[in-house]
């Protein structure tokens, strides 16, 4: 897996000439990676109830009023006197070990009367899992109707801020966005406001995708807008399901006529997009939805946002095939409701070879070579010559890139960082017991075989097995009998022969301990691992745990615990809130000296497999 993200230097995105865009849409982020796109969002004003609009507004029948027919007010859920508006939402990982590589925050509102504005429209506050307290965000203004003397009745605006660096170390948890300014009075077309946080994440266990996120400001009424997504090739497999996300301002629940149509490079016919919550002729209907369900992990979780729409949905059509195509086209139009499109995002699975070539070409563009210095180093163990090319650029603020080139691979050299070893429990017919260095996991076995053929050498003997718990094909680079030898190979890049990403997996057979490594040799003192968690959001107890395994698949953890219980132990487990893995442990301690004694004594001469001490710190 490629851990480094690359922004494209060009984009492919076009509109029909009769589109009514107030601000031309342009690419904000595009990438080719093993990962996907997601979002959290909420409205910031709603139907007034008492002093504010904190109560969810859930009227969604045909009698529900439009936003210009009700008294509106700020939502303000945080009970903080320093904020005048606030709403929150919960961001959760989709898979274990997801890593956020991009986070873009957008906010928009109608605001015709600015005589009493408290602050600039691009200045807001946000509280994140990483910050825990509010910090100020000074975003860029993408569009402001006031500056263009347009849409004077409701004067909408849209702002953006890239907050990737502010959240990437601790992205999962609750977000509260505050101090977004919006109209609250009854105005022509109605008052509406909201925010959306788009994230792009990497994941070891899903295929390559092309992910594109655009922003702009387009008024939709009468004349359609067409968007063409290009510059990708999808694999030749039976079923591919693209994902589409759109954010819009001023879409009303009971005003129909708005729709999205789709076709591909293999079809001239257009098909309407819809699901059970969004009809084909009322796609923008004041809802925030994830796929075919209301996104309710937010406060307040109104079923009717009164004018703010965000959705992420899978495009599933019996008539359209997305296999082996290179273009997808969308048309957005309305003959009834009037609204503004602010964001469009698209994600589609792409051919793996195409993705790798694209990443390599982007890398060469992003890192121009201006100077080269070459050293020749002899490798005595196999009498081959390894050419080490240290590439630097004289451009200011550019980082140096170190490349390793041999007769097999050319890639960025990495200094391996410690990673937790994940354990899988299988029957013996799937794979031999031991420790494996895993290069990747694939949904399609043909991709696994193709890559195995490319990397096979005297030092690397790829082995593929299918994990019955997640149906993925794991491509491994080496098999080792002990954790010590596996870790040695991990840190020395498998004897300087493989420089891409990989991790260590431990395979244990059902109803059998992996090994008795420490029955005849002493334990070595290891650094105590730590997990820091927020005490307000955790049921974990502060103290020390004698951890024996880590599982990304919960059913494997259950099997292992049952195995330990049959051996006379009383084990338990906890879930690490940072990566959602299951950690099994033999015992819990409040005394550091006591757990050290048990560690060095093989848990009173009862347990001879690997384990380690982990400390939970509550902050």
Image (spheres, rainbow, N blue to C red):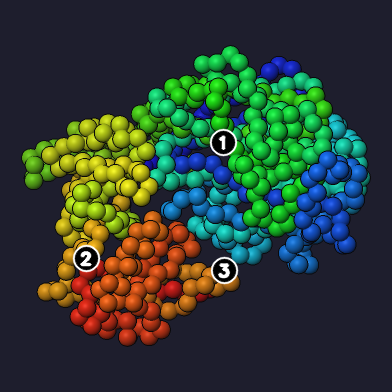
- Image depth: mark 1 or mark 3 in front: 1
Q: Residue at x 31, y 73 (%)?
A: 565
Residue shown at 38% from the left, 72% from the top: 572
Q: Tell which circle, 3 or 2, labels the residue nearer the N-terminal end.
A: 2
Residue 235 seen in this snapshot = no
Residue 560, x across and y down, in percent? 31, 64
| Residue behind mark 2 | 513
First in residue order: circle 2 vs circle 1: 1
Look at the numbered disc 1 and give the secondary structure of its residue: strand
Under circle 2, the secondary element is loop
Q: Tell which tag, 3 or 2, sits nearer the viewer.
A: 2
* On screen, residue 163 above or below 456: below
Vertical comparison of 618 with 31: above or below: below
Crowding at dot 3, Cα within 10 Å, few <14 / some 14-19 / many 20+, comes out as few
Toward which corner of the image does residue 375 lie, by quadrant? top left
Badge 3 marks a residue whose secondary structure is helix
What is the x, y in percent for residue 204? 39, 46
Q: Are marks 3 and 2 in contact (CB under 8 Å)?
A: no
Q: Residue at x 16, y 57 (%)?
A: 481
Give the Cα separation between the discs numbered 2 and 1: 43 Å
Residue 314 is labelled as 1
> Left or right of 425: which side holds 542?
right
Label drawn at residue 537: 3
């Amino acid at each position: 897996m490629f851990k480094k993200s690359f922004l494209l230097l060009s984009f492919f995105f076009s509109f029909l000439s009769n589109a009514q865009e107030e601000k031309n849409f342009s690419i904000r982020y595009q990438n080719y990676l093993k990962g996907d796109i997601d979002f959290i969002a909420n409205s910031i004003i709603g139907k007034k109830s008492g002093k504010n609009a904190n109560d969810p507004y859930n009227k969604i029948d045909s009698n529900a009023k439009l936003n210009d027919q009700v008294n509106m007010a700020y939502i303000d859920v945080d009970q903080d006197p320093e904020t005048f508006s606030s709403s929150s939402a919960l961001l959760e990982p989709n898979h274990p070990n997801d890593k956020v590589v991009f986070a873009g925050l957008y906010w928009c509102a109608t605001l015709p009367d600015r005589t009493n504005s408290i602050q600039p429209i691009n200045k807001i506050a946000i509280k994140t899992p990483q910050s825990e307290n509010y910090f100020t965000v000074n975003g860029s203004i993408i569009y402001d109707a006031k500056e263009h003397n347009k849409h004077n009745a409701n004067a909408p605006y849209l702002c953006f801020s890239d907050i990737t660096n502010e959240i990437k170390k601790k992205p999962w948890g609750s977000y509260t966005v505050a101090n977004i300014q919006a109209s609250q009075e009854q105005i022509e077309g109605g008052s509406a406001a909201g925010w959306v946080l788009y994230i792009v994440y990497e994941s070891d266990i899903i295929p390559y995708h092309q992910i594109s996120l655009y922003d702009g400001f387009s008024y939709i009424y009468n004349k359609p807008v067409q968007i063409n997504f290009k510059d990708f090739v999808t694999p030749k497999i039976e079923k591919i399901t693209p994902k589409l996300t759109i954010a819009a301002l001023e879409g009303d629940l009971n005003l129909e006529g708005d729709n999205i149509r789709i076709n591909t490079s293999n079809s001239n016919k257009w098909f309407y997009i819809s699901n059970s919550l969004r009809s084909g002729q009322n796609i923008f209907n004041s809802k925030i939805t994830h796929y075919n369900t209301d996104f309710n992990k937010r406060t307040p979780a109104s079923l009717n946002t009164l004018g703010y729409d965000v959705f992420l949905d899978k495009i599933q059509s019996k008539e359209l095939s997305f296999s082996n195509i290179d273009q997808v086209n969308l048309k957005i139009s309305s003959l009834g409701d009037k609204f503004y499109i602010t964001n469009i995002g698209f994600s589609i699975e792409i051919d793996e070879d195409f993705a790798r070539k694209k990443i390599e070409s982007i890398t060469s563009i992003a890192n121009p070579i201006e100077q080269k210095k070459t050293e020749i180093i002899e490798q005595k163990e196999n009498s081959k010559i390894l050419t080490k090319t240290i590439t630097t650029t004289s451009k200011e603020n550019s980082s140096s890139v170190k490349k390793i080139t041999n007769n097999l691979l050319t890639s960025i050299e990495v200094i391996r960082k410690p990673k937790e070893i994940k354990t899988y429990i299988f029957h013996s017919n799937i794979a031999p017991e031991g420790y494996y260095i895993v290069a990747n996991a694939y949904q399609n076995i043909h991709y696994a075989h193709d890559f195995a053929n490319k990397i096979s050498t005297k030092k690397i003997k790829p082995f593929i097995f299918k994990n019955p718990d997640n149906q993925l094909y794991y491509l491994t680079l080496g098999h080792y009998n002990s954790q010590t030898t596996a870790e040695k190979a991990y840190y020395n890049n498998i004897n300087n022969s493989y420089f891409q990403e990989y991790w260590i997996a431990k395979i244990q057979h059902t109803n059998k301990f992996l090994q008795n490594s420490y029955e005849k040799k002493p334990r070595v003192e290891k650094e105590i691992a730590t997990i820091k968690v927020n005490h307000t959001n955790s049921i974990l107890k502060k103290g020390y745990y004698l951890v024996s395994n880590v599982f990304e698949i919960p059913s494997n953890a259950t099997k292992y615990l049952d195995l330990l219980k049959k051996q006379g132990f009383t084990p338990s487990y906890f879930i690490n809130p940072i990566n959602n893995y299951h950690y099994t442990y033999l015992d819990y301690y409040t005394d550091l000296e006591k757990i050290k004694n048990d560690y060095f004594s093989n848990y009173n001469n009862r347990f001879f497999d690997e384990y380690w001490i982990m400390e939970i710190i509550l902050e």
